[in-house]
Amino acid sequence: MLFNSLHFFLFFPVFCYLYFAVPRRFQHMVLAAGGYYFYGSFSPYFTIILLTITCNDFIAGKMMDATDKISQKKRWLFLSMAVNLGILFTFKYIDFVDNNIRDLLGLLHIGWFVPEPWFNTWVVPVGVSFLTFQSLSYTIDVYKGVTKAEQRFSYFAAFTAFWPVMVNGPIERARNLLPQLHKEHSFDYSNLQQGLFRMGWGLFKKVVIADRLAFYVNDMYAHYNEVSGWTTWLGAFFFLLQVYCDFSGYSDLALGGAKVLGIDVMENFRRPFFSKNLADFWTRWHISLSTWLTDYVFFYLGAYKAKSAKVVFNVIFVLAICGLWHGANWPMVISFTMVGCAMAIRYLWQNNVVRAIRPSNTYKLFDKYFPDWAHSVVTILIFLFCFLLFRVYSAQMALNAAHPENPVSWTAIATPLYGNLFKLHTANYLTEWLLHKGTIQLGILVFFIVVLFVVEALTGDRKIEQVVLAKNRNFRWSIYIVLLACIVWFGVFNNTTFVYFQY
Amino acid sequence: MIKQILYKAGILAGIILILSLVMKFTLPFYWGDSTQTVKFEHYKKNSEQYNAVYMGGSLEYRHIDPSIIDSTLQKNGIDFRSYNIAVDGHTFVEQMTDLDEMLKIRNPNLKYVFISISSEPYFFPANLHTSKWVCWHNATSTYRALSIIPTLEDDLKTRLKFCYFYVMSWVENILKIGFMPEVMQFIFQKDTYETGYLGNKKDGFYPYDYEEHRMFMEYQWEDTLIRQSKREYESNAVKRDSLTSEVRKSFEQYTDKDKANAAMVKLCMEAYNKCKKMGIRVFFVLPPRARTNYSLLLPVFHAMPDDAKIEVADPRKYPKYYAVDYGYNFHHLNYRGAKLQSHEMARQLLPLLQPAETSAP
């Protein structure tokens, strides 16, 4: 059940009614049941994985709480991590690892003892990366003493099966969510208003902007051999914007849905296109993952306290892990590693060069005349360069599905894309690409992108729903109607185009 | 509190509904599909050139060559100038909406209409929510679909599912869900649509083997699918033979006593009578290679008036239509096959038209 589906449109009001109609002490059970229904709607088998993660981490948490011995706590933490990461590895990474071993041994002309990759047909459970990371954060926090272990299974089940954040984040922490689940929630009209508006805004970003951008991004990558220079840069920008609108739109839907239930979930995006540098970008983009990696990996490795060389390694390593989390394929890993390298270079520059020249007048002048927007542009350009690779694997999959007789490797796609990227005197295929859906479609897209940036600039770091709801009634209703009309009339509700079944 | 929420939600939904209805009655009708738009716009501009129109889906669009039928009949002294308005993927019910819209276009010369009996109202569910699928729905089409689907012999779940799909598509049409960009494009840029859909002779006929060599489809991957379907057809002899033997079996088992689907017959006869009132003669065509089971189509076809039937589907009579040399993919003929079928249609039409032509003053 996706948030932008009719199924959810029916599920949500029914669920809210049940949630507020039952005695308050049973609300968390309704949440857990709703979560299992929500997750089971993708495939009933997925609920087995959810239940396994829940039971494992609940028991691990309780056992760690019951003992004072560090060695025993470690043992339970290890078990919890082994099960969570084992599930993640089994469903998401085993095929990737198998393929790499096969390729590597193939290069050395050595046979691989696994005869058939029978697991390559397994379906990756929806949101398994989010589920495992959210649940893992609980056991790690219990181990570190940051969170007290949950004593009642039903509350813990409601935590792991909290459907608003279940399949696409934000990766919520137990210390924020569990105490809220213990509280009784009465229906609150203000929460409903705020939640629904936030959901509407998220839906707008998803179906009006992201899904429309998809037409252009898909087409750009399908013509990877033809595009060059500015066409590629603009395509990369469209792709970054598509990912942002898609992902942040989904997070808005999650936050809004949770708000209606009276639960506050952490923000996942905070105007990343206004970032002033790469480190700032990561405090604004997929915040729940970047803070997760910071808390549980980066700080564990020593963060910025170590020597320069170690810090450089830490930054690159964490970003590589981030890439691997996003997808079990090399382009994704390399893409994030490139971001990590850029961040490491920035760290070295700041630490060695800027620190030395900061007192000079030249630096002060530079700082004065290099405005914030220029910092943002440079940051985004660096990201575009790295994120161009992010989409290469799915482009490869799409192309190979369409042309099985002529398969291409991801390097065959990436090489011309990067090879022609800096031919800035060219913009091959630009007009055909931008106009392939017609000038009207392009005009609509540009208009809504401008609307998005204007809204983000105007709202600043405040929550959009709070900004709108603070206005007078006429203004609010005008916004409601315009937003709804845009979603209904300009939304893309079927990403697939018409299929002629007569084939 | 619930009342207040429902009241406000109702007001919001009401405003959107009113705005959608205002749009419906102020904006021009749009097919949601560039192929159909181009074909209908061409007919609108040149309607008086034609006195015969072929309706239907891809089995007509890709199989009926108007130039062959025209020349054969004209050689025999019959004034016959036909246009192929059929579009890929059109089902039985959609075809009736096409007919309604086609008849709204003024053409005093129109004398003959060909309706295809080749499909039931089922469709590929992946097409739900696409503008091409949603745009044509209205109260009448929904009623037509809902009158036929419950009478089909499939399981209850399938019938209920498709009834729901039709109702939902109509609701989406009323609210104009996701329509606006394409409607705007239609209003401002319809002249820029690709006219290749009209075919080489601009008569609406365009076989797949022509299209394969000229990629202009709205969605590039469709061209890929076309080729893929051809490859699969050529390589999978087992499936080819089993499809043909199924068709043959349906023809062999058919008897006059087989009961026709009353709802489909009623719909056909309504179209027949409507055209008759306008002085237009209707012919029902039973094409080869239909995806729908012929055991459903044959009784409906045979329930039509005798002087209004053209049958080109029987593999016993027309084995070439099912031969690999004349096929493009499992459910379509190639150009060679289309030429054969067009000649055969002309041959069958000749005796049906000659008495009418000779008795005309």
Image: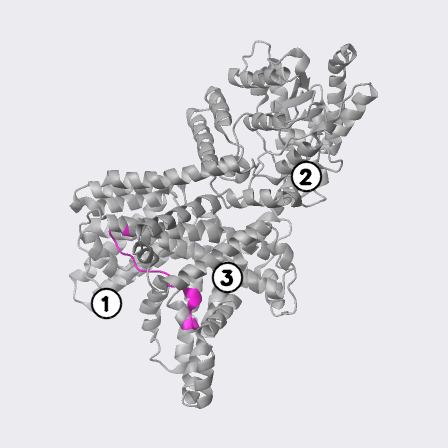
Which mark is in front, 1 or 2? 2
Q: Secondary structure at mark 1?
A: helix
Q: Is residue A254 above or below residue B58?
A: below
Q: Is residue A328 visible?
A: no
Do tags 1 and 2 sit on the same chain?
Answer: no
Region rendered in magenta: A258-279
Location of mark 2 (residue): B197
Q: Which quarter of the picture shows residue A269?
A: bottom left
Q: Of residues A15 and A130, which is closer to you in this image?
A: A15
Q: Amino acid at mark 3?
A: Phe
**Are labels 3 and 1 assigned to the same chain?**
yes
For mark 3, what is the residue?
A390
Q: Residue at x 47, y 80 (%)?
A: A369
> Can the viewer see residue A61?
yes
Answer left or right for B316 relative to B182: right
Q: Classify the position of the N terminus of chain A by image quarter.
A: top left
- Point out residue A44 in the picture as x, y percentages from the top left corner: 36, 41
**Image point (42%, 37%), residue name:** B18
